[in-house]
Amino acid sequence: MKKPDYSKLIISLIGLFVFYGVIVSLLHSIESQVPGSKMISWQDGLWYVVATITTVGYGDVYPVTYWGRAIGFVVMLSSLGVYGFIIGQIANFMSTLKEQRELGLNGTDFNDHVVIIGWNDFGRSVISHLVAAGKQVAVITRERSSIDAIREFYDSDKVYTLYADYSNFEMLEKANIREASIVFVNLTDDTEKLVYVINLKKNFSNLNYVVTLDNGNLKGTFQNAGVTYTICKNEISAKLMASYIFEPDVAVFSEEILAYAHNDTEYDIKQMKVNDTNSFVGTFYDKAFFDLKKSCNVILIGIVKMKGGEKKFIKNPEGSLTIEAGDHLVMMMDGKGKEALKKQFRIQEIG
């Protein structure tokens, strides 16, 4: 969508000012020297023109000559067109503002949010889980018909929608993409995703990217292109199906903990960041495991540490591993455990 062009409006307004400026000058020159005239000065002429245009018509100032009344007649008739013009421009301006807001052209101030490029049923399902988890989402779509559907399902303070061409990287700035925690490239074809990610990283190289793949053999290619996380939907579905066949109860539980816990009785796996002020800093992993289970009914299942500038997930580590500020603890918990965890240990949730 092109930005609104106000040059015609500005030219029209200038033309109106010039036109009525000439009218005031003519009235003053014609009426000022006539005996009994009510328009002695140009201010009187201006007062008459404004009163006539606005249809107030005080009657304290009026032309008394033939040509003065002829000009007054023109002023009276032109006021109808001026009103129509002003009302039309105001309506057009308000309509433009509304459309800009609906299409997301005014931008957003979301921070640490998720940017999803591309809208479809799968993206809608992902957004629902993210919103339920309290995450703000910016959706970028090139389908105009998708805008109304997204706005109907989600509140604007939780989901921001931008109508834009995906290749217009300047427009992507309106989604505050540089401040996003992760970018989900939700296009339809694996090849299209790969080409797009390569071009996207040229403009936004420091962001984390995640894609879903139809062909799991392309994982290495996408990772070499700079994608942080690659997920093959077919592989996940196959593993879950096999689990349902051989371990149905485990499969049901796995499906539950992969989603966001909507109430206090449902379980969820969360990743929490250990802040400098956290009481676990300097504590052995084993001790934190028992403390969390006893005080919050939270199960610690792993820890993420930075090794050589990269994150390393250590699952259920053995030995005397010390927890440090900046580490991430991976835990399984229900809704009650999450609240108790935040109050007692001041751990920051990141996912």
Image (cartoon, helix red, strand yellow):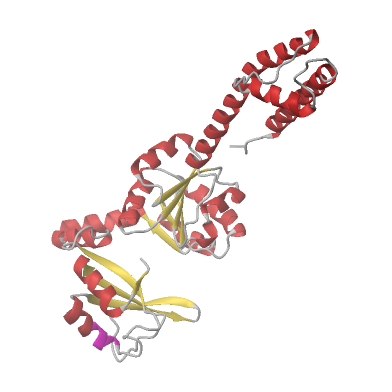
Side of 291 relative to 124 (left or right)? left
Q: Identify the residue at horizontal 57%, vertical 30% (top origin).
A: 90
Q: Is residue 214 visible?
A: no
* Pick the front one: 163 or 5: 5
Locate the N terminus and report the quarter of the image it occupies.
top right
Q: Where is residue 239? Give x, y as percent.
A: 27, 59
Does any portion of residue 257 appear in the rendered image? Answer: yes
Where is residue 72? Give x, y as percent. Answer: 72, 14
Left or right relative to 31: residue 97: left
Kindly give the residue lying farthest to the front in the view shown. 36
Residue sitting nearer the eye, 81 or 30: 30
Prevailing secondary structure class for the magenta stretch in the rendered image = helix
Counting from the top left corner in percent of width and height, residue 131 is at 34, 54
Q: Which residues are magenta?
A: 285-289
- Residue 317 placement, left or right of 160: left
Picture quadrant of residue 285: bottom left
Q: Outermost residue toward the top?
A: 66
Position of the C terminus, as image quadrant, is bottom left
Up-down relation of residue 45 to residue 350 (above or below): above
Who's the residue at 66% across and 21% down the image?
60
* Magenta stretch contains residue 86: no
Foreground residue, 3 or 187?
Answer: 3
Looking at the rendering, which quadrant does residue 92 occupy? top right
Count of residue discs = 0
What residue is rendered at 57% in x and 25% in y? 87
Q: Is residue 287 magenta?
A: yes
Q: Where residue 69 appears, x then y in whole percent? A: 74, 11
